[in-house]
């Protein structure tokens, strides 16, 4: 980011798009409602077969701040984001998925925070998760405390930062060259990007819920697959993250999730993975829930384990939101 008046800094809003015709207008309106007006919106379409491109181009014709690009179809959000970042002109980049929304003050608070904290290169906010179906109450992402070193928390807990709440300095893109386009990371490209950024850059958090994350049946983040965990593990190994001081935290998380995925399968594999999870991060009490697998028969384990997980989720929710705001 260049020095000078923060109000003059251009924010490039990066949005991948695929068959999102019904979301585009609302997404655009949430950007236009921002009090901070120095922005450009770059939407990268991934071969939509509905009227997405038509709607976007109509908006772009009326608003010169909007650009629509159409790279070769890839079925990869990372490639679409990378294509948009490659042509972006901003001092700062902000991510916004096409089905999500900016809340009031999203850009203003992000720009001001980075302008006041020169040691910070990436800032995010808390998030309100809302359902596409009417009448369902919103859910607020847990307010996890950000440590001095966010890499530790990202590796230990995984995703706690919503992509659509992120704003960062151009130099992060220049250094990383964008997101990994490994197909196995189709639903974890953003997490890999954040981990890579956290390895060398300071993160900060703006108070308030400044992004709105939409939950709907067609969102790729709803995909029930373990393949992205394996892809992320390979990427982190390649980049040397797992050999660093916090690598064990990710490996603990990885084996814990793999054990949960295969909970109903042969006991030896599940027990082995739960044991690995504990050994890689023995101080993380949550991992010891899996230790039950070492002490009881599988059928009883599955029954008790599911009850414990439900109780744990309730306890964590209550401790994260003591005021009942969730």
Image (spheres, rainbow, N blue to C red):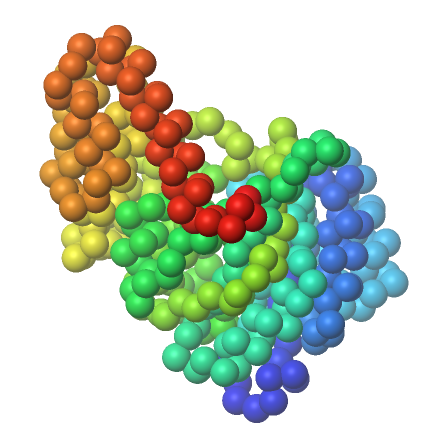
> How far across and how far down the image is residue 15, in percent?
63, 54
Which quarter of the figure is the C terminus placed in? top right
Q: Quadrant of residue 276?
A: top left
- Quadrant of the image occupied by residue 241: bottom left
Left/right placement of residue 251 relative to residue 69 reads: left
Number of numbered tags placed on the structure image: 0
Q: In the rendered image of this protein, does residue 16 appear above or below residue 42?
A: above
Return the x and y of residue 175 as percentages of the image width and height: 39, 69
Residue 231 placed where, x, y %?
Answer: 34, 38
Is 97 drawn above or below residue 108 in the view shown?
above
Left or right: 71 as drawn, with respect to 126: right
Q: Residue furthest bottom?
A: 4
In-front residue for pair 139/242: 139
Q: Position of residue 10 (x, y in %)?
A: 64, 76
Q: Is residue 16 visible?
A: no
- Image point 75% across, 34% down: which residue? 134
Residue 251 drawn above or below residue 271: below
Looking at this view, name the residue that lies furthest to the front. Answer: 323
Where 83 falls versus 207 (above or below)? above
- What residue is drawn where x is 53% and y is 46%? 324
Q: Nearer the viewer, residue 231 or 129?
A: 129
Residue 232 in view here: yes
Residue visible at 58% across and 75% down? 111
Compared across the picture, whether 200 is left or right of 216 comes to: left
Q: Is residue 285 left or right of residue 82?
A: left
Seen from the viewer's position, the closer of residues 95 and 69 is 95
Q: Residue at x 26, y 8 (%)?
A: 299
Residue toward you, 243 or 125: 125
């Amino acid at each position: 980011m260049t020095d000078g008046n923060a109000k003059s800094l251009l924010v490039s809003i990066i949005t991948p798009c695929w068959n999102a015709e019904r979301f585009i207008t609302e997404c655009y309106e949430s950007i236009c409602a921002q009090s901070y007006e120095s922005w450009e919106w770059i939407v990268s379409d991934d071969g939509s077969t509905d009227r997405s491109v038509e709607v976007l181009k109509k908006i772009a014709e009326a608003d010169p701040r909007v650009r629509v690009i159409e790279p070769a179809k890839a079925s990869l959000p990372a490639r679409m984001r990378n294509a948009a970042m490659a042509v972006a002109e901003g001092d700062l980049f902000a991510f916004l998925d096409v089905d999500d929304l900016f809340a009031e003050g999203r850009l203003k608070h992000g720009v001001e925070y980075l302008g006041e904290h020169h040691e910070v290169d990436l800032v995010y906010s808390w998030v309100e998760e809302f359902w596409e179906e009417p009448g369902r109450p919103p859910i607020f992402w847990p307010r996890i405390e950000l440590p001095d070193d966010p890499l530790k928390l990202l590796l230990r807990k995984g995703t706690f930062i919503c992509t659509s709440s992120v704003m960062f300095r151009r130099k992060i893109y220049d250094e990383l060259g964008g997101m990994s386009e490994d197909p196995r990371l189709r639903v974890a490209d953003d997490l890999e990007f954040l981990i890579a950024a956290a390895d060398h850059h300071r993160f900060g958090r703006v108070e308030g819920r400044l992004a709105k994350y939409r939950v709907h049946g067609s969102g790729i983040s709803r995909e029930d697959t373990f393949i992205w965990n394996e892809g992320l593990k390979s990427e982190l190994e390649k980049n040397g993250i797992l050999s660093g001081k916090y690598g064990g935290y990710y490996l603990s998380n990885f084996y814990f999730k793999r054990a949960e995925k295969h909970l109903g399968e042969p006991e030896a594999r599940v027990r082995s993975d739960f044991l690995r999870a504990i050994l890689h991060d023995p101080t993380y009490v949550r991992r010891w829930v899996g230790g039950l697998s070492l002490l009881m028969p599988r059928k009883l384990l599955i029954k008790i384990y599911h009850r414990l997980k439900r109780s744990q989720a309730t306890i964590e929710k209550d401790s994260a939101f003591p005021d009942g705001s969730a």
